[in-house]
Amino acid sequence: MPGAYEKYLAEVLIDEETLQKRIAELGAQISQDLAGIDDLWLVCVLKGGVMFLSDLTRHLTIPHAIDFMAVTSYGAGARESSGQVRIVMDLSTNPAGKNLLIVEDIIDSGHTLDYIVKMLRTRSPKSIRICALLNKFERREVDIKIDYVGFDIANKFVYGYGLDLDERFRNMPFIGVADLNALEEQAP
């Protein structure tokens, strides 16, 4: 997909200042709620969650460790989940006895996160909490308890700030809505 992100941008949904303000608020709330918890591990779901994790961790005032896992339910170039979740990269640390905070970029249908939570529960963590930057509640098919939500958003195809558009434009400092007509024009 050649060109700059502007070609595919229908609108800026959440600007950089608003994003950073809300992430600071989430960091303060998590630090307050989880003060005194031992063995807090942030589990970042790659690739989309890495920018959110990087900024969120700077706002946490409590001790914590970080680990990563990569899962996919999308095929190459897909705009919607296939519903088939696959672990691409597992945690490097055993989560048994640890308090986990899953850090996710976006939750829509809930299938991927439901799979992750069920799989992690089999490994005997002390607790599992979820922090999502974006909650696309209109698309929810699986009931997921989200402990910390950055923003509830409508059912729009978004990219930027870690979320990709065909593996590109994750580096945008804001969340944009994709212009689906421009995307279709680029399709081979």
Image (tube, rainbow, N blue to C red):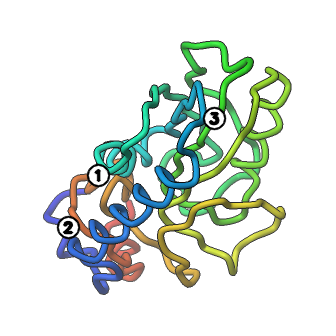
Look at mark 2 in the image and give the residue it sits on.
Answer: 5
Numbered badge on residue 95: none
Residue type, numbered disc 2: Tyr
Numbered badge on residue 168: 1
Question: How far apart are labels 3 and 1 at the CA level?
Answer: 29 Å
Residue type, numbered disc 1: Arg
Pointers 1 and 2 in contact (C-beta within 8 Å): yes
**Which picture quadrant has residue 91?**
top right
Name the residue furthest front. Answer: 36
Q: Secondary structure beneath disc 1?
A: loop
Counting residues from the start of the chain, the first of labels 1 and 2 encountered is 2
Mark 3 or mark 1: which is in front? 3
Residue 102 percent coordinates (x, y) = 59, 43
Residue drawn at point x = 26 percent, y = 69 percent:
174
Residue drawn at point x = 50 percent, y = 45 percent:
76
Counting residues from the start of the chain, the first of labels 3 and 1 encountered is 3
Look at mark 3 in the image and give the residue it sits on.
Answer: 100
Q: Secondary structure beneath disc 2?
A: helix
